């Protein structure tokens, strides 16, 4: 572009083209110097006058432009409210027509101003582009104008305050990813202004709908699906398109949708993940790319994830080694962090560490997405995990890491190895233990059996079983019992029978803590033998074996409780997931205990109605001891407290807080957990107590002045502070987030 294009250029053509004399005389040199000085002074004077005296807006009435801008905005609203009809045209005034002649209402993507007025307005030094230009197109403001040569040979920028608003913007193709993302982000709830600024006019239907109306449509679509996996796939697609709508739907319909988003449906999804795969939803970190972990972490599209769920797929629920297919468990669990606790979905990060798989079905599957080889050695997995923990903490210093579904030995090893160095916890060990403890605290109150007389048998001695038992031991010690006395209240049973120190096999390290020494050399090989020997008051199942609590086992439990006196009730917790792995059903438990059972399961069961001896129909309501009552609030509390690590007391406190979160109606109905519809209320209570525990432990980085202020107002102030920071999509303009 020539300099003539710039109206404020002070370099004339004659200045630039005048040749120098090859042998100047002294007088000519003096004359030239005088001339250059004069020219320079004139140029400076001209430049000064032009920059100070020239006012391009002197002949423009700004109020006229403002009125037209307001009218354009009103036109948009009127068009959508259908009480004024007109056609908005680029660089022309709005032309109003009678309703009978109006065929459509059109909004063009360019600013609705007269072109000449726009040029004059843009020349003003105080000009600010309309707000609706800047969010989507910050590049609209032109860069500094090109350099021009002065007589002295120095480069100088030509003064031009004109932003580049007049050139038409390139129109992206409709199929571009940015366009599609904008189109689906809020769907039909986009306001007229948003449709204009995002260039979506005509790309989505004219109708504007509320979030609630769209939720109703989505529920109708879900109910037309025939299988739970199909329903999951629909929900997954909805989340990818519009997470505000997805989470509003989940929050409002948590009882119906949580079994689809997480257990039990997620188990079936993980089994078929490689076949069902349609889009990336997580980070897939392969051991073959171990030197690029930081790069992969930085490739995550959201800049500030604050909590991740990481698995290696080696023990998914009760389904065994699923390899990379186990990533579904990380995806589902993080959906619950958002739905149950309000951690913003952009701040969550699902991760699977692919170190191979020992699952022959996966290795032979032509669609399997992971490494097609056996798992690497334990030592290599350990080194890979060390590198991952170091990398994730370096890339995201505020990250809370939740370990999920690692096989038992690795689960305990990783937790012990990293718990004091990083902000991390294991949901299978600590989360399950906390949620069972919360239910057990309330169950003891209902059972009629004093705490000191409680005797517990655990069927299952893996990471979850041992983790739960240790949580209960801590509860007993806090109630005044010594650790040895508390530990002696637990009998753990695995596939070989009662866990004893003289059983003859090599015990896994994590089982040794509860190995019995008082069996007098006798080995109890079956669960029935153990119950006959122990006479327990509570039976907990974490075996991932369907039907292991047979009728004879449950009736033996009831008999042992009845032998202690009238009015006593057995506690039965079949906690394995999914439903196909549950130790018994709720209906069986009610029937085999004549309706006296205090029941909690890992997966959801429906209420059951049974006739009493006098012929009256009684409806029994099951409790679901789902980890969703604990881990979202625990993670939320750790994030908000800016805790440097997750302490054992923070985990224990989460259980105690959950136990105390029941309302009057729930207590009256004999429930031991809050209704699942109140899971968000429970998560706020859990998060509040976890934050206070972090402060007591000295691991919270929040300023002490903040705590002092909260203490002056009590828990109400802290609860309000937490609620202000959680993600709750009441509308598509919701901004609160963590």
Image (tube, grey):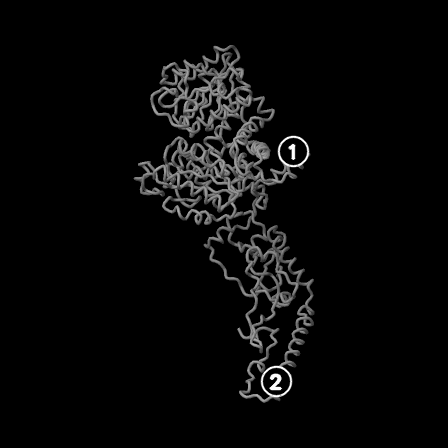
Residue 327 lies in quadrant: top left
Q: Nearer the viewer, mark 1 or mark 2?
A: 2
Residue wearing tag 1: 716
Crowd tier of the residue under label 1, counting other residues whose Cα lies within 10 Å: few below 14, some 14–19, many 20 or above: few
Mark drawn on residue 32: 2
Q: Position of residue 728 (x, y in %)?
A: 57, 40
Residue 348 seen anywhere in this rendered image of the structure: yes
Residue 526 vertical position relative to residue 222 in the rendered view, above or below:
above
Horizontal side of 284 relative to 473 (left or right) equals left
Q: Position of residue 313 (x, y in %)?
A: 39, 37
Residue 487 vertical position relative to residue 634 in the rendered view, above or below:
above
Residue 592 vertical position relative to residue 235 in the rendered view, above or below:
above
Crowd tier of the residue under label 2, counting other residues whose Cα lies within 10 Å: few below 14, some 14–19, many 20 or above: some
- The first of marks 1 and 2 along the sequence is 2
Residue 589 seen anywhere in this rendered image of the structure: no
Tell me the CA gap for discs 1 and 2.
Answer: 83 Å
* Near-viewer residue (371 or 21): 21
How many callouts does the rendering have? 2
> In this view, which residue lies farthest toward the front?
26
Q: Position of residue 200 (x, y in %)?
A: 53, 54
Q: Quadrant of the C terminus?
A: top right
User: Which residue appears at 67% of the width and 37% of the height?
Assistant: 709
User: Which residue appears at 62% of the width and 40% of the height?
Assistant: 703
Q: Secondary structure at mark 1?
A: helix
* Near-viewer residue (232 or 226): 232
Residue 597 vertical position relative to residue 367 in the rendered view, above or below:
above
Q: Position of residue 380 (x, y in %)?
A: 36, 40
* Near-viewer residue (447 or 667): 447
User: Which residue appears at 49% of the width and 50% of the height?
Assistant: 181
């Amino acid at each position: 572009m020539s300099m003539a294009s710039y109206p404020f250029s002070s370099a004339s053509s004659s200045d630039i083209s005048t040749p120098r004399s090859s042998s100047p005389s002294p007088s000519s040199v003096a004359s030239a110097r005088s001339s250059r000085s004069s020219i320079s002074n004139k140029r400076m004077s001209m430049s000064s006058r032009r920059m100070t005296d020239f006012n391009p807006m002197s002949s423009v009435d700004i109020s006229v432009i403002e009125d037209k801008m307001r009218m354009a905005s009103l036109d948009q609203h009127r068009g959508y409210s259908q009480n004024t009809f007109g056609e908005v045209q680029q660089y022309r005034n709005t032309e109003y027509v009678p309703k009978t002649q109006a065929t459509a209402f059109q909004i063009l993507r360019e600013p609705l101003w007269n072109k000449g007025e726009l040029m004059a307005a843009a020349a003003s030094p105080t000009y600010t582009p309309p707000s609706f230009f800047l969010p989507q197109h910050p590049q609209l403001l032109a860069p500094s104008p090109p350099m021009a040569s002065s007589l002295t040979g120095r480069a100088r920028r030509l003064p031009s305050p004109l932003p580049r608003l007049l050139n038409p913007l390139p129109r992206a193709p409709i199929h571009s990813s940015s366009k599609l993302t904008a189109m689906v982000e809020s769907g039909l709830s986009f306001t007229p202004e948003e449709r204009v600024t995002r260039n979506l006019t005509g790309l989505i239907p004219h109708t504007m709908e509320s979030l609630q109306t769209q939720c109703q449509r989505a529920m109708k679509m879900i109910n037309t699906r025939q299988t739970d996996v199909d329903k999951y796939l629909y929900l997954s697609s909805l989340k990818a398109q519009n997470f505000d709508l997805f989470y509003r739907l989940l929050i409002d319909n948590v009882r119906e949708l949580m079994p689809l988003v997480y257990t039990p449906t997620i188990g079936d999804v993980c089994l078929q993940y490689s076949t069902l795969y349609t889009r990336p939803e997580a980070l897939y970190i392969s051991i073959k790319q171990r030197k690029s972990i930081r790069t992969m972490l930085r490739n995550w599209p959201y800049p500030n994830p604050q909590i991740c769920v990481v698995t290696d797929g080696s023990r998914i629920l009760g389904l065994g080694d699923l390899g990379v297919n186990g990533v579904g468990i990380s995806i589902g669990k993080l959906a619950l962090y958002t739905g149950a606790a309000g951690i913003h979905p952009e701040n969550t990060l699902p991760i699977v560490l692919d170190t191979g798989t020992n699952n022959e079905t996966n290795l032979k599957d032509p669609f399997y997405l992971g490494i097609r080889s056996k798992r690497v050695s334990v030592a290599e997995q350990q080194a890979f995990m060390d590198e991952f923990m170091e990398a994730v903490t370096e890339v995201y210093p505020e990250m809370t890491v939740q370990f999920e579904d690692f096989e038992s030995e690795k689960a305990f090893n990783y937790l012990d190895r990293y718990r004091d160095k990083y902000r991390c916890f294991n949901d299978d060990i600590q989360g399950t233990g906390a949620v069972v403890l919360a239910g057990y605290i309330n169950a003891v109150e209902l059972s009629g059996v004093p705490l000191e007389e409680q005797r517990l048998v655990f069927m299952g001695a893996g990471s979850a079983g041992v983790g739960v038992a240790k949580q209960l031991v801590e509860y007993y010690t806090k109630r005044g019992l010594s650790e040895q006395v508390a530990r002696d209240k637990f009998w753990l049973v695995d596939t070989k029978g009662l866990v004893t120190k003289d059983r003859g096999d090599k015990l896994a390290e994590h089982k040794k803590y509860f190995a019995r020494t008082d069996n007098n050399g006798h080995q109890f090989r079956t669960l029935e033998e153990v119950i006959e020997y122990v006479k327990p008051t509570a039976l907990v199942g974490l075996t991932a074996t369907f039907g292991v609590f047979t009728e004879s086992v449950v009736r033996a439990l009831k008999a042992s409780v009845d032998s202690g006196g009238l009015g006593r009730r057995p506690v039965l917790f079949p906690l394995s997931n999914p439903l196909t792995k549950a130790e018994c059903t709720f209906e069986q438990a009610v029937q085999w205990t004549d309706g006296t059972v205090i029941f909690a399961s890992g997966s959801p069961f429906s209420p059951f109605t049974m006739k009493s001896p006098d012929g009256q129909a009684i409806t029994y309501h099951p409790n679901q001891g789902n980890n969703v009552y604990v881990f979202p609030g625990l993670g939320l509390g750790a994030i908000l407290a800016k805790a440097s690590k997750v302490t054992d007391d923070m985990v224990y406190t989460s259980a105690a807080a959950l136990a105390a979160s029941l309302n009057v109606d729930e207590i009256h109905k004999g429930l031991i957990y809050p209704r699942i519809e109140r899971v968000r209320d429970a998560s706020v209570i859990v998060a509040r107590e976890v934050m206070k525990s972090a402060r007591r432990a000295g691991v919270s980085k929040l300023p002490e002045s903040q705590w002092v202020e909260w203490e002056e107002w009590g828990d109400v102030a802290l609860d309000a502070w937490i609620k202000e920071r959680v993600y709750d999509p009441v509308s598509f303009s919701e901004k609160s987030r963590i």
